[in-house]
Image: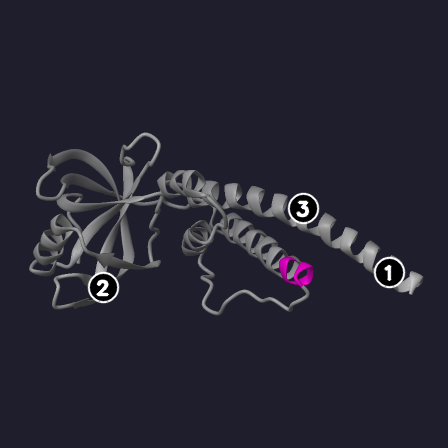
Amino acid sequence: MTELSVRELPLFPLPEVVLFPQEVLPLHIFESRYRIMLKTVLESDSRFGVIRLDTKTKKIAEVGCCAQIIKHQTSDDGRSNIVTIGQQRFRVLDITREAPFSTALVSWIDDEPVEDQDGLLKLSDTVLSALKDVVSLSGKLNDSETFLPEGVPQIPRELSFWIAAHLGGPAADEQQQLLELKNTGSRLEREFEMLDHTRRQLAARTALKDTFSNADQINN
């Protein structure tokens, strides 16, 4: 089905949360305004916009990700637990309503067409290799054998979103920047920089750990 390029979408601002396409996001709905939003959404197409709320500026981001409700359960007190999955990204054009919940006129955005498919696939393989190294070195530091989870995407665009969604630590600023990029190659290049930096740090820590371990063995 062809998507209209512009539509009105209910917004659900979340503090320092960035949703990416194909990522699962469980939510607990308890505020009255979002209970109303949920009821409205379920009566239409079960979709709303998840958008990052900056806790410092108290402003929402310009780009968010549409969430599709795939499971919901409402208790007797009106609270609901829902499970959503990220779909298209969108850009906020105009806030059309602020009460009882916010809605906005949004336009869908997607990555630019790929001109060098072979180059992108090579870059994707390089990023995936760096990711595997980071996971392996992390496991070695913690004295445990660690592997990537099953189902890591192999398609460059989907891989770039998966990596962005699984950045460790307080990474909301970086995640938001990656969400807003409209070039798959640029997103993968930025992720490789981060992964390679982490890989080098982990390799140095692992070498240091091995040195001390060998020294202890000699002394004993």
Distance (Cα) linking label 3 and label 2: 40 Å
Q: Amino acid at mark 2?
A: Asn
Element type at mark 2: strand
Residue closest to the eye, 195 or 5: 195
Q: Residue at label 1? A: 216
Element type at mark 3: helix
**Tag in front: 3 or 1:** 1
Numbered label attached to residue 81: 2
Q: Amino acid at mark 3?
A: Gln
Q: Residue at x 64, y 69 (%)?
A: 145
Residue 53 coordinates in the image, percent (x, y): 29, 39
Residue closest to the eye, 108 or 11: 11
Residue extending furthest front?
Answer: 77
Tell me if mark 3 has few (under 14), some (14-19) or many (20+) residues whose alpha carbon lies within 10 angstroms of its own.
Answer: few
Tell me if mark 2 has few (under 14), some (14-19) or many (20+) residues whose alpha carbon lies within 10 angstroms of its own.
Answer: some
Distance (Cα) linking label 2 and label 1: 52 Å
Quarter-of-image position of residue 79 = bottom left
Element type at mark 1: helix
Range covered by the magenta-colored residues: 138-142
Q: Residue at label 3? A: 201
Q: Residue at x 27, y 36 (%)?
A: 60
Quadrant location of the C terminus in the rendered image: bottom right
Asked whether 149 falls inside the magenta stretch, the response is no
Q: Are marks 2 and 1 in contact (CB under 8 Å)?
A: no
Nearest to N terminus: mark 2 or mark 1: 2
Residue extending furthest top?
Answer: 57
Residue 128 coordinates in the image, percent (x, y): 55, 56
Nearest to N terminus: mark 3 or mark 1: 3
